Amino acid sequence: MSSTIYYRFRSQKDSNRILFDGTGLTVFDLKREIIQENKLGDGSGFQLRLYNPDTDEEYEEDQTVVPRSTSVVARRSPATAASRGPGTATAALGNATRYVTGKPRVFASMKRKTAAPGAGADIGSNAMSEEDRIASMFANQESQWENTQQEMSSATPIFFKNNSANNDDGPPPPGYMCYRCGSRDHWIKNCPTNSDPNFEGKRIRRTTGIPKKFLRQVDIDPDSITPEEMAARKIMVTDEGKFVVQVADEHSWEDYQRKQQNRGAADPAEARWQKGHFADLPPELACALSGGLVRDAVRTAGCCKRLVSRAAMEDALLQSDFVCPLCQQPDVLLDSLVPDEAVDAKVREFLAAHGEGAPDTKRQHT
């Protein structure tokens, strides 16, 4: 939301507005906005003064901040002129040119109050007003910055020099592994394969996000195994530098199987899909997960392509974070399951031959 300062000339009855962003405007910026809004020219022929309408006190310092929602009275008077000396031309002084093209002038109060070099003005002195203390503080900061610039201009540049004392020239700590080649006896920056443009990395996978209970440590020689073998065996590396492989969550799988059996026992219509319900169940119609008659047959397109029931496979993938429970292939998505309509037709024939009718083989959503 924009802030507003109200102003009017002494000859006016109604006030005008200056819109801006912030909590206040300096006197310098406010005068410049008034000159530009009223198209008063370059300010060379007049002076512009601002007054507090309540106390009739003039805003003398350009750096004084006028808070928003304040009303001020503007007065325009002719520019003053003073002589530079005997026989010299006069120069116009005190005009408003700087508000159009220049910068704020130095604090007048600062010039009056600043002590001589070596004396040092006391900013905390009770004899100084609040504005004088602020002006003195800014003057000291400006003086310090000028001294710093002078010192920097005469200083000799010191360029960065590598500190060899901080280099890791010693042996790596226990558990460290070079993720470029898989070795543990050197830092990765000292890897012998850094200068080999044809080297193919080990493609070492990390165990980020996998619980430790689903990891089993394996003993391998990183110098003798090839990248293809590591990818085929799905070998990963822990933060401690140990080689591991991911294992299935057998406890959750057994719990799932037990729930499936209990659900089948409670519902006679579901019992036909459970393991052991048909003594003469052909192997080609058996679900690879449950061992019973396959229901809504699908195959995994991206890995082992085993025949499974859609409901059982989807539940298993969701519980194992999309890892195939049959071949441990990761990133097996639900939409990668391909229906096998030929097997579904055989299932219907098998049920009809056993007097079971033709039930709905699709997954039941509850």
Image (cartoon, helix red, strand yellow):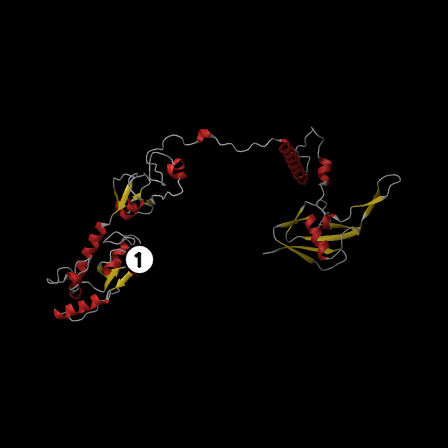
Residue 272 pos. (x, y %) = 15, 64
In the depicted structure, whether residue 100 falls above or below residue 148: below
In the depicted structure, whether residue 138 falls above or below residue 294: above
Residue 83 pos. (x, y %) = 85, 42
Q: Secondary structure at mark 1?
A: loop
Residue count near mark 1 (Cα–Cα under 10 Å), binned few <14, some 14–19, many ≥20: some
Q: Which quadrant, please, contains the C terminus?
A: bottom left
What residue lies at 45% left-to-right and 28% top-to-bottom?
A: 165
Amino acid bearing label 1:
Leu
Residue 10 pos. (x, y %) = 76, 55
Q: Is residue 202 left or right of residue 279?
A: right
Q: Is residue 17 left or right of residue 40?
A: left
What residue lies at 38% left-to-right and 39% top-to-bottom?
A: 193
Location of mark 1 (residue): 333
Hey, which quadrant is residue 354 in on the image?
Answer: bottom left
Hey, which quadrant is residue 292 in on the image?
Answer: bottom left
Q: Is residue 290 left or right of residue 72?
A: left
Residue 159 pos. (x, y %) = 55, 33
Q: Is residue 357 left or right of residue 240?
A: left
Residue 203 or residue 114, whichever sits in front: 203
Residue 146 or residue 290, whichever sits in front: 290
Residue 111 or residue 231, whichever sits in front: 231
- Residue 310 can be seen in this image: no
